[in-house]
Image: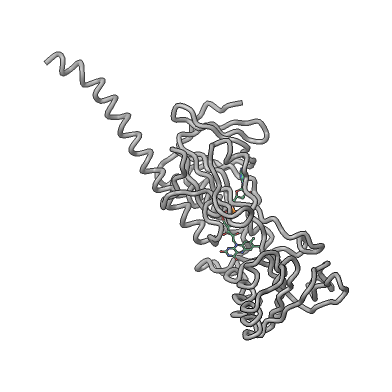
């Protein structure tokens, strides 16, 4: 059932981007509703890194503090999943999975994406712990340790050379990668990166720690951390309902294109965070949320002013006619 209230802004997604935007909009005295499914990308991680002044903070604590700030400034937060949205006559209606629909003058999509992991037994269970993807999020924590790189695409060679910056003990698991060319082999050898040929069968776990990677040949190669390249899976039904296209390579890096302030190709719809910048870390996603919020507020100020002028002209007309 459609709610009678028309919010100034509905924010879809309550991660770093959505909550930062919501706080800025609430502090601009805008009425704001955040709809959040509660599954942030880094939800499996135990500590946040690279966010100035919040080193090691559990990601859930950052978001809890953000939700408290939104509420403190008068914003509403609703647990739920938006499945579609449409705009008509300057008002957007967002439909939720549970049948509710919410209305707003502007829409901000900050729904991030889901990481689809390679199909290797053990990877899903270890994700965010000793199966990782980003050197800037985790490199320091795993420095000088035995690190494996699972190759599922050609960029794995670059990943291996990148992680070499953090450890001298790197093994590239060739897995799905066709043969490496001579230049790649020369680079890997020069940087002392070992190559494990053949497909990976599973992970070896002892107690609560990764100890190695088992190849289909039966050989086990010791490693304490495994780097993978997940595929980005976005809420395509929601984006499609708004007529928003995704650009970039199929799978990894698919994203919504926006202008510098986060405005999408659809008037009245903004996007911020990983949904439009797949490599953004938490602090960058938060920053994009703030930037989009200021642009949305400016857009609403323009509309409020236009309407005020129309009203002023209508009410001024009879007076002018009388004089
Ligand atoms: C394992 C791991 C560890 C990481 N560690 C770090 C780190 O240490 N430091 C760092 O800076 N970055 C780290 N990152 C990256 C970080 O997760 C992202 O930068 C950040 O989550 C992006 O924020 P966001 O707000 O765009 O998206 P998210 O944080 O993913 O938030 C999106 C929110 O929208 C919700 N949502 C999705 N679809 C809908 C819908 N249809 N309706 C309603 N809600 C919806 C989701 O459930 C989620 O709550 C890590 C990532 C991973 C995968």
Q: Nearer the viewer, residue 76 or 249?
A: 249
Q: Is residue 163 left or right of residue 224?
A: left
Task: Give me the residue at 64% from left, 41% from top.
Answer: 81
Answer whether residue 307 is visible to the viewer in this image. yes
Quadrant in the rendering for residue 185: bottom right
Q: Residue furthest front?
A: 182
Task: Give me the residue at 80% from left, 68% from top.
Answer: 200
Q: Residue furthest left?
A: 323
Q: Residue furthest top?
A: 322
Q: Nearer the viewer, residue 265 or 195?
A: 195
Q: How is the image coloured?
A: one colour
Ligand 1 occupies quarter: bottom right
Residue 21 percent location from the top left of the image: 48, 49
In the figure, 269 relative to 313: above or below?
Answer: below
* Quadrant (top left/top right/bottom left/bottom right) for the C terminus: top left
In the figure, 256 relative to 220: above or below?
Answer: above
Residue 12 percent location from the top left of the image: 56, 43
Residue 257 percent location from the top left of the image: 49, 49
Q: Is residue 206 left or right of residue 138?
A: right
Task: Give me the residue at 60% from left, 35% from top.
Answer: 84
Q: Is residue 254 left or right of residue 127?
A: left
Residue 62 percent location from the top left of the image: 57, 58
Q: Is residue 110 left or right of residue 287?
A: right
Q: Nearer the viewer, residue 17 or 270?
A: 270
Q: Nearer the viewer, residue 269 or 153?
A: 153
Answer whether residue 64 is visible to the viewer in this image. no
Task: Give me the residue at 58% from left, 42% from top.
Answer: 35
* Quadrant (top left/top right/bottom left/bottom right) for the N terminus: top right
């Amino acid at each position: 059932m459609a709610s009678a209230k028309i919010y100034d802004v509905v924010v879809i997604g309550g991660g770093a981007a959505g909550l930062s935007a919501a706080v800025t909009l609430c502090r601009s005295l805008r009425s704001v509703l955040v709809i959040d499914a509660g599954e942030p990308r880094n939800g499996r991680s135990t500590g946040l890194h690279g966010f100035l002044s919040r080193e090691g903070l559990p990601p859930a604590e950052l978001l809890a503090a953000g939700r408290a700030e939104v509420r403190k400034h008068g914003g509403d937060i609703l647990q739920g999943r938006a499945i579609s949205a449409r705009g008509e006559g300057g008002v957007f209606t967002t439909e939720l999975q549970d049948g509710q629909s919410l209305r707003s003058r502007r829409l901000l999509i900050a729904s991030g994406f889901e990481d689809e992991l390679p199909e290797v037994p053990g990877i899903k269970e270890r994700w965010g712990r000793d199966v990782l993807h980003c050197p800037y999020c985790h490199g320091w924590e795993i420095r000088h340790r035995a690190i494996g790189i699972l190759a599922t695409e050609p960029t794995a060679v670059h990943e291996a050379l990148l992680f070499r910056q953090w450890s001298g003990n790197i093994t590239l698991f060739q897995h799905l990668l066709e043969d490496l060319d001579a230049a790649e082999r020369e680079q890997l050898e020069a940087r002392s990166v070992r190559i494990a040929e053949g497909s990976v069968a599973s992970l070896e776990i002892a107690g609560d720690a990764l100890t190695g990677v088992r190849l289909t040949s039966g050989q086990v190669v010791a490693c304490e951390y495994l780097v993978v390249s997940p595929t980005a899976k976005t809420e395509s039904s929601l984006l499609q309902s708004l007529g928003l296209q995704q650009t970039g390579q199929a799978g990894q890096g698919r994203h919504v294109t926006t202008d510098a302030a986060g405005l999408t190709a659809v008037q009245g719809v903004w996007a911020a965070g990983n949904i439009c910048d797949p490599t953004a870390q938490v602090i960058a996603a938060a920053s994009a949320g703030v930037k989009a919020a200021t642009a949305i507020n400016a857009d609403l100020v323009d509309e409020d002013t236009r309407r005020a002028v129309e009203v002023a002209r209508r009410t001024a007309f009879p007076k002018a006619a009388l004089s």
